[in-house]
Image (cartoon, rainbow, N blue to C red):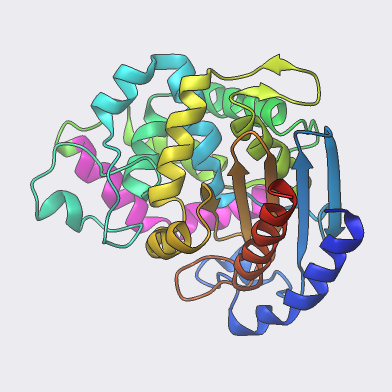
Amino acid sequence: MNDYTLKQLVDKNFDYYKNGEVANYIPALAEVSPKQLGIAVYDLTSNELMKAGDVDVRFAIESMSKVPVLLLAIKDCGIKKVFETINTEPTGFAFNSIMNMEINHRKHPMNPFVNAGAIATTSLISGKDANEKFERILSFMKQICDDTDITLNKEIYLSESKTGDINRSLAYYMKGNQMIDEEVSETLETYFKQCSVNVTATGIAKLAAVLANKGIAPWNNQRIISEESATIVKSIMTTAGLYDESGEFSVHVGVPAKSGVGGGLMAAIPNSYGIGVFSPALDKFGNSAAGIQLLKDTVQELDADIFQ
């Protein structure tokens, strides 16, 4: 695998953007051009980063933020506390559904990657108020993505907050049923902000590389998270990382992955590669239409390299 091969795969899959639409239910994301596709691959063996396409375009991290925030919550509270608050089961309901808690009279959200679970995860982050909690999240994202230029996109944050009534209903339901302890308005402010930071496919590849490398940043050999945390999060990515497309992707591709409605995708191939992809037009499942095809082709190509 090299930059030229990646460029060929980007060219091959570019037109798949026509099969999707940008996330127009969030006004600020509706303005993003769908005609973008980029990929970065961090090779743990050679300690090299390969790139092609729109890899350094900044875009909203959205639901991919659920991965670093879960890792930070584990650092703050410990694995036992986090998973006493949130289950780890896949769900057949929509990512923003309240039905899995209401119908089954559940005491906890199904997993950290559905919105209810992600909001509960955010409520576990340490800090005296929403600003301090978000600054800790932002600092951790900068570290694990090796990107000091990650910033809050205020336009997207305001757009997220303005259109976030379903997330408010989830949060108040959980608060009313003693699933979360923190103040709802504070937790939601932090949650909307964490989803609204600007990242690149390059930074996401580095985040995925830390997961693939058992919690150690390959660019400086420093441990950022525990090996157990990395293993747990990769497992949840496998079962619940791509919404209702998780099962099919797991069967046919077989690597831990997480998506976001900003058009991002990450994949962590254990002990081998971290991958970041960006293309903002989404398929019917809410995953990047061109990005998911590019990711599948890339994993297939990398498998050929691994087993040569």
Residue 105 horizontal side relative to residue 30, left or right? left
Q: Residue furthest right?
A: 4
In the rendered image, residue 47, in percent from the top left (x then y), is placed at 83, 32
Location of residue 295 with respect to 119 vertically, above or below: below
Judging depth in this view, the residue of 136 and 279 nearest the camera is 279
Looking at the rendered structure, the number of numbered marks drawn on it comes to 0
Residue 129 in sight here: no
Q: Tell me, yes or no, whether the highlighted magenta stretch contains residue 170.
A: yes
Residue 192 horizontal side relative to residue 174, left or right? right
- The quadrant in which residue 29 appears is bottom right
Residue 63 horizontal side relative to residue 78, left or right? right
Judging depth in this view, the residue of 274 and 202 nearest the camera is 274
Location of residue 179 with respect to 93 vertically, above or below: above
Q: Residue at x 47, y 30 (%)?
A: 231
Residue 6 in sight here: yes
In the rendered image, residue 101, in percent from the top left (x then y), is placed at 17, 49
Judging depth in this view, the residue of 186 and 212 nearest the camera is 212
Q: Residue at x 85, y 62 (%)?
A: 5
Decide whether the magenta segment is chiefly helix, strand or loop.
helix
Q: Residue at x 32, y 62 (%)?
A: 94
The magenta region covers 152-175
Q: Tell me, yes or no, whether the highlighted magenta stretch contains residue 198.
A: no
In the rendered image, residue 257, in percent from the top left (x then y), is placed at 53, 50
Location of residue 55 with respect to 195 vertically, above or below: below
In the rendered image, residue 149, in percent from the top left (x then y), is placed at 80, 36
Q: Residue furthest front?
A: 308
Location of residue 186 with respect to 20 vertically, above or below: above
Residue 34 horizontal side relative to residue 99, left or right? right
